[in-house]
Amino acid sequence: MEAPVSRSHIFIYCDNPSHPRRVAVTNFDRIDGGLFAGWCERPASRAGDRIGTGVTMTGDIPAATGWALDAGTANATVRNKYELVCRKCRRRPQPVRAEKLHPVLDDLIEAGVSEASLALVAAMLQRRSKG
């Protein structure tokens, strides 16, 4: 019998004082069990539009349409890169690769946090890079 699939969720928002209320940046879900285990971005939505921050990379280059079908990329390192930025104020965009962001998200979940400001995530990324 398969182990049950568990999910954790983190909502990232901008709480810049110039906004009348906090602004959704993106969401991340951690899925454990089943065929996939790891973090997936679930973009924030606004009036039916999906707003995503992620880009799939092959090596250090953004993947072109159809990259998964290209035999030349079969053995390439594939990863995701995100630019966490508020769509309203555009202040301090936080470009980050998945391998740097995912441990920060794990730390937040371990601490029992399900919502985090963009400023907190940026500070945690900066502290981790110095550590």
Image (spheres, helix red, strand yellow):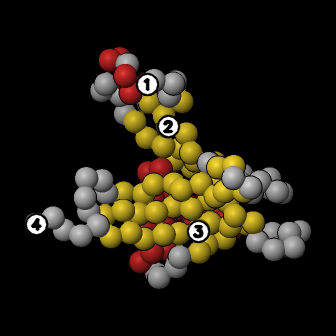
Residues at discs 3 and 4 in contact (Cβ within 8 Å): no
Percent coordinates x, y for residue 60 in the rendering: 49, 31
Query: Mark 4, residues whose alpha carbon is within 10 Å: few (<14), some, or many (≥20)?
Result: few
The span from disc 3 to disc 1 (Cα, nearest Å) is: 29 Å
Task: Please give the count of numbered marks on the rendered protein.
Answer: 4
Q: Is residue 77 left or right of residue 25?
A: left
What residue would you read off at disc 1? 67
Query: In the depicted view, which residue is nearer to us: 121 or 31?
Result: 31
* Quarter residue 32 falls in: bottom left
* Earlier sequence position, callout 3 versus callout 1: 3
* Earlier sequence position, callout 1 versus callout 2: 2
Residue at far bottom of view = 112
Q: Which mark is residue 1?
A: 4
Q: Nearer the viewer, mark 3 or mark 4?
A: 4
Q: Which mark is residue 85?
A: none
Rendered residue at 51%/24% (across/down): 65
Rendered residue at 48%/66% (across/down): 105
